């Protein structure tokens, strides 16, 4: 299913490198040494999660159904084609992706959804016959989840080093035998 998700993203004009740019946008201030390759690795790992794959396939298929005008409800058809501001299910689907990576992913998603950098801005533009109502939010959520994953992993080793060195300073005889 991973390959199918990549194919759907590519078919809709989204490359993993585009998402990596969004991840760098979110993390560069905190981790200036972060590379695009590390971002791509995190994105691939996020995309291997079954819940992410399900959200991606669901969202893209709903966008395609709206484009092809095969939805049974005319009101829903109109709402999806307009990407109505009061239709929030696209964000709810994106939250499902973010929730897998904790509060940092969720706050990253809120930020990136507001700023709309790079590919997210492109997807969000008004395309006459194209529906990206779900896709722009899914791409943002994948970027936010990947950034959250990286933030957790990149912060962890430095935190351990600080804790170890502080612990050793507090207890100079840390090699005591248990009593």
Image: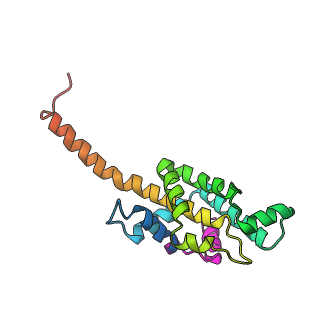
Task: Write the residue at 36% across / 62% down.
Answer: 29
Identity of the residue furthest to the top in this view? 179
* Residue 129 x %, y %: 74, 77
At which x and y percent is residue 32? Answer: 32, 65
**Which quadrant, please, contains the N terminus?**
bottom right
The extreme front residue here reads: 85
x and y percent of residue 146 in the render? 48, 60
Residue 108 visible in the shown view: yes
Q: Is residue 145 left or right of residue 1?
A: left
Give the number of callouts: 0
The front one of 48 and 74 is 74
Give residue 36's quadrant in the image. bottom left
- What is the x, y in percent for residue 136? 61, 66
Is residue 47 left or right of 79 when viewed as pictured? Answer: left
The residue under the point 20% across, 44% down is 165
Is residue 139 found left or right of 63 in the rendered image?
A: left
Which color scheme is applied? Answer: rainbow
Query: Which region is colored magenta?
Result: 1-17
Q: Is residue 16 magenta?
A: yes
Q: Nearer the viewer, residue 128 or 24?
A: 128
Q: Considering the image in quadrants, where does the C terminus appear?
A: top left
What is the quadrant of residue 51 in the picture? bottom right
Above or below, 122 against 87 in this view is below
Nearer the observer, 59 or 85: 85
Taking the magenta stretch, the answer to whether it contains residue 155 is no
Foreground pick, 16 / 127 = 127
């Amino acid at each position: 299913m991973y390959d199918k998700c990549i194919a759907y993203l590519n078919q809709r004009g989204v490359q993993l490198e585009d998402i990596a740019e969004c991840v760098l946008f979110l993390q560069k201030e905190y981790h200036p040494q972060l590379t695009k390759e590390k971002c791509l690795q995190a994105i691939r790992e996020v995309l291997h999660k079954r819940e992410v794959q399900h959200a991606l396939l669901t969202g893209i298929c709903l966008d395609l159904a709206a484009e092809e005008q095969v939805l049974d409800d005319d009101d829903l058809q109109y709402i999806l084609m307009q990407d109505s501001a009061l239709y929030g299910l696209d964000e709810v689907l994106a939250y499902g992706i973010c929730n897998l990576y904790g509060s940092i992913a969720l706050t990253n998603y809120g930020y990136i959804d507001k700023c709309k950098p790079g590919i997210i801005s492109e997807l969000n533009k008004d395309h006459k016959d194209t529906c990206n109502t779900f896709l722009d939010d899914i791409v943002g959520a994948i970027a936010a989840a990947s950034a959250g994953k990286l933030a957790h992993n990149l912060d962890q080793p430095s935190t351990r080093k600080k804790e170890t060195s502080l612990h050793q300073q507090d207890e100079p005889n840390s090699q005591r035998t248990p009593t």
